[in-house]
Image (spheres, rainbow, N blue to C red):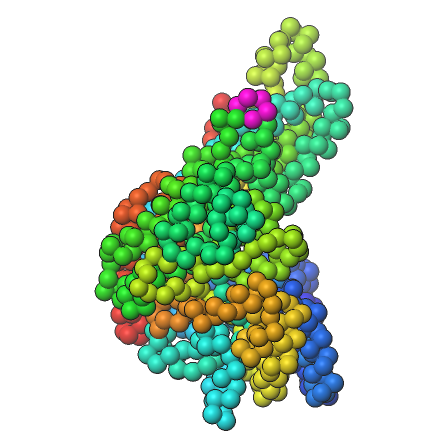
Amino acid sequence: MNTVFPNLKAKGREYLFILPAVIMLGLFYIYPFFKIFQLSFFDWDGISKNMIFVGLAQFKDIIFDNPIWWQSMAQAGYITLLALIIQNGLALILALFVDRGIKYGQVYRVIFFLPPILSGIVIGLIWNWIFNGNFGLLNYWLAKIGLGHLAKTWLADPDTALTCVAVIHMWKGFGWGFIILLAGLQSIPRRFYEAARIDGASNWDVFKRITVPLMIPVFVLVMILTVLGTMQIYDIIVSTTGGGPGYHTEVPVSRIIAQMLHSSRFGYACAMGLVFGLALVALSVMQMNISKRLKQT
Amino acid sequence: MLIPLVALSFTGCAKKSTESSITEIIVWHWMSDRVDAFDKLAAEYKNKTGINVKFELYAPTTAYAAKIRSAAQTNKLPDIYAVLLEMRDFASFIKAGHVHDLTSYMEVDNDAWKNVFYKSGLAMNCFSEGNQYGVKPGIYGVPTDVNNIQMIYNLDLLEKAGWDTSRLPATWDEFILLGDKLKKAGTPGLVSGWGETWMIHCLADNFAWNIMGKEEILATIKGEIPYTSPAWISVFSLFKQMKERGLLFSGVVTMVNKEAEQIFANERAAIAFNGSWCVNVYESMNPNLRYAVSLPPRVNLKRRMFIWGGTTSFVVNKASAVKEEAIEFLRWLTERKQQSFLAVETNNIPANRYSANMLKGPIAEFADDMDNVVHPRFLPIEEFPLVTEAFDKGIQSIIIGEATPLEIAENVEKTKLKETKKAARLKALREKR
């Protein structure tokens, strides 16, 4: 007894210190998650006091009977794919240049990091003007260099709208990748490069055999952040195309919001959120597994 | 440690309001352009009655709509607020006990209060007998100003294109003819915020009311007439025709209304489809703009043209401790004098029809057509939101040329059948409970 109570007292004091954090976590993360989980089984308009239990019906509808939802997922996937390849590829190339002590490296660092700190809505409005079919900068310059026949209403054309949104997103997100990749590159001990050079390694050999293997954890981190950030794209869509023309630039978040606010289907929107969340978790786990395998090889 | 702190902060708020000896009415709204006018009226009301009315602004509209939803969920709605939502949401607010029934107040003294309003303005706040939402029939809101959406023509650009501006296009054929003239003159035609799909729906609905009339529209919503009927296909086809004749401003399908207003105000398009609020926008952007307002062109010459209208309305919180005072304030706010003041200060159409005669210029032209106003909210039943979405997005697809009117009609009908089945399933579940 004597040994139990002092232990309990000591432990109790310890728990007391973490109690505020536990309450905050519970209140703002765990409770909302379980609430969303609960609501996804109900038909509810978000206002009324009556909710109708519909079981898995909403999940069934989303998965098997909602082609627009899957179209929006595919469209977000397309933007993500472009971001993974082009945005991160470009970020890596520029990070490599800056890491090698390029002139005005600090200036580039600041310039490249400017877009990510701007609001998505502001960026959307700026690019709206660039892509504007009537008075836009892009069409103006195309005409100036004799390519006026290529001018079009970029954001209202179903063939180009989604790619234009992807370009805007990549321009905004590129700075994050650049900074993280640069930090990763700078953490590689210089002596590895010096030793390789003494052994006569070429630039390509150094990149392939030293930089890439040591950067794999950073690549994985950047990839996961890119996937999570891009799949949840929304602000740029709102300020450029509004999901149109037709459904051509709809993405999962815009569909969830449409269900919630325009159709008053809160329960259905919660179910969509869960399906979307699960898809993102699955993607992240997949990426981590690939990363583990790459590390082993 | 944290719990008492949070609890204290809440009790702190409650104490402040209950201890106050002056009656205070809290009003929530989103109308940033009316802040000064509301504050002046509140000051005048305080002088008159000693009651403090506090207008609290929450803008933009999306943020406001989200705020009242969350306030409803936590029973934290103010004494007076505006319901900026669809009819079904309004019904949910009423059924959840957040809105006070104002019928008896409106009907006292032979409908004295009720009769001061434009019928359409009041209709937006009414639930009729047998409405689909199961709301007790009655009047649940007080309109403070009204608006409508029409065609607006730039007179200078029309004259330049060789059009006699003493007679604006009244029929579809004249409208198309004007389009041809504008095209020949190299002047872009119709601009509107059709990236916000409700504005496409608005024009399509105007045409549908003109072509079919109320009964057929109602029958379609009830599922008795399919969207693949010739009348509906002709509605969709009008948009195809506008596109093919080069009448539409390029990029109109993803354009937000703000951008459309800017384009029209800067005389880069000859026609706009916009609401009466545009008068203020155009005035601030280009005071020299010469324009005139007209009803959209009639397709069916045997029937009149209807236009969409809206209202800014306030409701009284049923749970408010100062309910009667809140109603009295709204009655005062909608009296002729206060309404005239609001009309002059804000350049909007007043909800009190007797205050509208003092309006001048384009806003008066809008006000003249208030009797032509309709809205889906006037119907006892509402279309499924997903059907409306398929309808509006479908018209966007027609305009960008990726679908035919028939294909869109079929898709809308398919969505309709699916939603009807789903609604039947839900109804069965509800009855089972």
Tell me the quadrant of the picture where the C terminus of chain B can be found.
bottom left
Q: Position of residue A20 (x, y in %)?
A: 66, 62
* Along the viewing direction, whichever of A157 and A113 lies nearer the viewer: A157
Is B13 located above or below residue B302 in the figure? below
* Along the viewing direction, whichever of B140 and A274 lies nearer the viewer: B140
**Residue B157 drawn in magenta:** no
Is B201 located above or below residue B51 in the figure? above
Q: Position of residue A112 (x, y in %)?
A: 67, 32
**Residue A146 drawn in magenta:** yes
Res B255 visible:
no
Q: Residue at x 60, y 87 (%)?
A: B328
Image position of B156 (left or right of B176): right
Q: Residue at x 50, y 38 (%)?
A: B186
Kindly indicate the quadrant of the structure image that contains residue A139: top right
Q: Position of residue B114 (x, y in %)?
A: 49, 84
Image position of A98 (left or right of B321): right
State the extent of the magenta-drawn residues as a range. A143-147
Res B381 visible:
yes
Q: Residue at x 67, y 70 (%)?
A: B345
Q: Residue at x 58, y 22 (%)?
A: A145
- The residue at the far bottom in this view is B109
What type of secondary structure mainly makes up the magenta span?
Answer: loop
Tell me the quadrant of the picture where the N terminus of chain B can be found.
bottom right
Kindly indicate the quadrant of the structure image that contains residue A128: top right
Image position of B138 (left or right of B157): left
Is B314 located above or below residue A171 in the figure? below
- The residue at the far top in this view is A200
